[in-house]
Image (cartoon, rainbow, N blue to C red):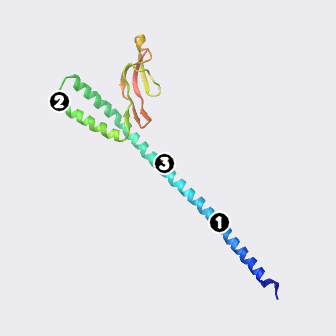
Amino acid sequence: MNKKNTPKNTKSKKADKISDVKNELKESKEKYLRIYSEFENYRRRTSKEKLEMIEVSNQELIKDILPVIDDFERALKAIKSEQKDDFEGFNLISQKLNTILEKYNLIKIEVNKEDVFDLELHEAITNTPASKKLKGKIVDIIEEGYLIGEKIIRHAKVVIGS
């Protein structure tokens, strides 16, 4: 009988082949998992970048609209100061515009006269002589400041007492 074709030798070859196939399968699974993981990371990263790009473009649009809002608010104040009763249309337009901007998370920074000046929220345009009570505090508000979510897109422009 030939030793090469013994049942033991055949079993050994089959076991080696099975072991090789198992190793290949294991390597293929590992490779698949790495590729799948890389693809998921890529998908998440591109989705995040797309959302950030949309957010930035919305911020730029709103920044461009802010001067129009400022002019509109000044016009409303002027009409109200003249005691005219026919400014209801202006109020409706203002409310609609504010509703739209709120939809995009635009929030007006609350600033009042006599508030303490905060460098993170306010931009000092100038300072003016003031009583001791108003030193380092806001004396006048030139332009309102705005946030989108928690990000400041325009600081409130104020005059502070010195």
Q: Is residue 13 left or right of residue 51?
A: right
Q: Is residue 112 above or below residue 102?
A: above
Front tag of 1 and 2: 1
Q: State the CA–CA distance, disc 3 to disc 2.
A: 47 Å
For label 2, the crowd category at 10 Å Cα-Cα, with few meaning under 14, some 14 to 19 and many 20 or more, is: few
Check disc 2 and report the residue beneath it. Answer: 86
Check disc 3 and report the residue beneath it. Answer: 49
Q: Tell me which numbered mark, 1 or 2, is placed earlier along the sequence.
A: 1
**Residue at screen point 27% across, 34% down:** 94
For label 3, the crowd category at 10 Å Cα-Cα, with few meaning under 14, some 14 to 19 and many 20 or more, is: few
Check disc 1 and report the residue beneath it. Answer: 26
Judged from this view, the residue extending furthest toward the left is 85
Residue 96 position in % (x across, y down): 27, 38
Residue 59 position in % (x across, y down): 40, 40
**Residue at screen point 43% across, 11% down:** 132
- Give SS at disc 2: loop
Amino acid bearing label 1: Lys
Amino acid bearing label 3: Glu
